[in-house]
Image (cartoon, coloured by chain):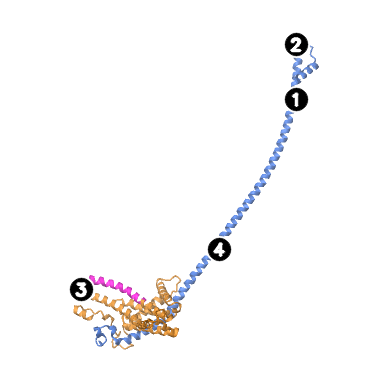
């Protein structure tokens, strides 16, 4: 992409926004506060403002912020209950953690000059692998060897079962990959597209009506995608959790 | 993009997402963020919102129950009112019937008394009328006697005999 920008003569660097930078300069060691740290902190702050500060009145008739907090709570809680049943509610705090962190990571990333940590494969892969490992361990702890029934399709013809088992096994291990790349890819692509159009607008100067209209449209779409991808990540986590709690088809 | 992995000294030439040098940093801070977020949510936010929702649910259930109770009471009161109204109506009817019967008895008695008085008066009047008639007949006889005597005296002076005249008239009147 950098090459096309150079050959087009524009000074567009759509990927620069994703660069991890140290906040105070210097090399990046694992403990260095970076823009990742800053925007993770802001996502936590936003969550605290919404869910903790928003609900501090404990009002019987909720204020607007409390109402939004309650809606978010009910949204995720119902999702878990619908997909995994009552026993999945034990994991509600962690799933809520995932949802809020990704949602605010996506949403805050839409602010100009911000940094979107959910566009980084390192972040999303860590989240997805955490879910994958936790769900796999949980599956074996809860069901023992019966958890392997997830790969043995008992209502298929006997001849097909080993083949299906291999396919199921592959698809099981591909889960964290698709789980993480879906989120990071969506975030990265959307932000890069906005940045490219912004570069066009900068190059065209005052006559840049079309790129600006395009930016507005893509931005609206991205606002939707920010929510939908947080939702998708969470609902997939619930689906994997359901497989661990109730293996078999 | 393939250069992204080895572009250590010049990260902007590829995808910053594939610059593995920043991975430990990102994962370190992400892990810390997850832990903080988890504790904030599981210790403060979620229990609080959960209890608020439960409180509201209970309050609404209580209010509904109370409303049902009050409604039932209102229905009972209406029933009692209707019953009282029906009782009062029956009582009023009973009183009206009794009064009517009393009045009828009084009227009957008064009518009977009036009839008796009227009968007595009629009898008295009839007696009077009979007496008047008798005295009137007697007067007629007297007048006839006197007149006849006078007439006889006028035609034949000195020949009038009161006794015979009277006998003649009596026979005439009877005839």
Q: Is mark 2 on a helix, strand or loop?
A: helix
Which circle marks residue A204 in the picture?
3
Q: How far apart are marks 2 and 4 (CA)?
A: 119 Å
Where is residue A99 drawn, in percent x and y? 38, 78
Q: How far apart are marks 3 and 2 (CA)?
A: 177 Å
Q: What element carries label 3?
A: helix
Q: Does residue B151 appear in the picture of this structure?
A: yes
Which circle's residue, 2 or 4, is located before the other in the chain? 4
Specify the subunit that label 2 lies on: B
Residue for point 61% across, 54% down:
B88
Q: Are marks 1 and 2 on the same chain?
A: yes
Q: Is mark 4 on a helix, strand or loop?
A: helix
Q: Which of B31 and B160 is in front in this view?
A: B31
Q: Name the residue under label 4.
A: B73
Characterize the local packing of mark 1: few (<14), some (14-19) or many (20 or more) Cα atoms within 10 angstroms: few
Characterize the local packing of mark 3: few (<14), some (14-19) or many (20 or more) Cα atoms within 10 angstroms: few
Which circle's residue, 1 or 4, is located before the other in the chain? 4
Mark 3 against mark 2, which lies toward the viewer? 3
> Is A196 placed left or right of A74 in the picture?
left
Chain letter, orange: A
Q: Do labels 3 and 2 share a chain?
A: no
> Is A208 placed left or right of B152 in the picture?
left
Q: Are marks 3 and 4 on the same chain?
A: no
Please state the extent of the stretch shown in magenta in the rendering: A203-231
Q: Name the residue under label 2.
A: B155
> Is A80 placed left or right of A207 in the picture?
right
Residue B22 placement: quadrant = bottom left
Circles 1 and 4 in contact, beta carbons < 8 Å: no
Residue B146 placement: quadrant = top right
Chain letter, blue: B
State whether residue A31 is above or below residue A61.
below
Q: Which of A116 and A114 is in front in this view?
A: A116
């Amino acid at each position: 992409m950098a090459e096309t920008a150079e050959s087009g003569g524009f000074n567009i660097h759509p990927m620069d926004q994703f660069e991890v930078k140290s906040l105070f300069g210097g090399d990046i060691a694992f403990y260095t506060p970076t823009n990742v740290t800053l925007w993770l902190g802001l996502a936590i702050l936003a969550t605290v403002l919404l869910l903790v500060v928003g609900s501090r009145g404990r009002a019987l008739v909720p204020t607007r912020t409390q109402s939004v907090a309650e809606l978010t709570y009910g949204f995720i809680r119902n999702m878990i209950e619908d997909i995994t049943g009552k026993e999945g509610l034990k994991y509600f705090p962690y799933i809520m953690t995932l949802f809020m962190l990704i949602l605010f990571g996506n949403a805050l990333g839409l602010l100009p000059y911000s940094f979107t940590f959910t566009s980084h494969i390192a972040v999303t892969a860590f989240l997805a692998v955490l879910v994958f490992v936790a769900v796999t361990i949980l599956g074996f702890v809860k069901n023992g060897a019966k958890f392997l029934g997830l790969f043995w399709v008992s209502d298929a013809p006997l001849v097909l079962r080993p083949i299906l088992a291999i396919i199921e096994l592959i698809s099981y291990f591909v889960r964290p990959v698709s789980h993480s790349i879906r989120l990071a890819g969506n975030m990265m692509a959307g932000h890069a597209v906005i940045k490219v159009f912004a570069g066009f607008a900068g190059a065209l100067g005052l006559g840049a009506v079309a790129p600006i209209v395009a930016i507005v449209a893509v931005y609206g779409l991205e606002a939707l995608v920010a929510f939908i991808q947080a939702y998708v990540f969470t609902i997939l986590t619930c689906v994997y959790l359901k497989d661990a709690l109730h293996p078999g088809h | 993009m393939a250069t992204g992995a080895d572009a250590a000294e010049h990260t902007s030439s590829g995808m910053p997402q594939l610059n593995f040098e920043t991975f430990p940093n990102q994962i370190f801070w992400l892990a810390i963020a997850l832990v903080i977020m988890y504790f904030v949510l599981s210790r403060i936010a979620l229990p609080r919102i959960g209890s608020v929702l439960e409180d509201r649910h209970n309050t609404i259930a209580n209010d509904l129950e109370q409303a049902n109770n009050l409604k039932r009471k209102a229905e009972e009161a209406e029933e009692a009112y209707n019953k009282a109204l029906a009782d009062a109506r029956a009582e009023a009817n009973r009183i009206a019937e009794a009064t009517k019967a009393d009045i009828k008895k009084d009227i009957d008695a008064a009518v009977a008394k009036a009839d008796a008085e009227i009968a007595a008066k009629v009898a008295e009047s009839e007696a009077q009328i009979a007496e008047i008639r008798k005295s009137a007949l007697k007067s007629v006889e007297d007048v006839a006697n006197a007149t006849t005597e006078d007439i006889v005296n006028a035609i034949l002076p000195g020949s009038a005999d009161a006794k015979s005249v009277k006998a003649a008239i009596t026979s005439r009147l009877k005839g």
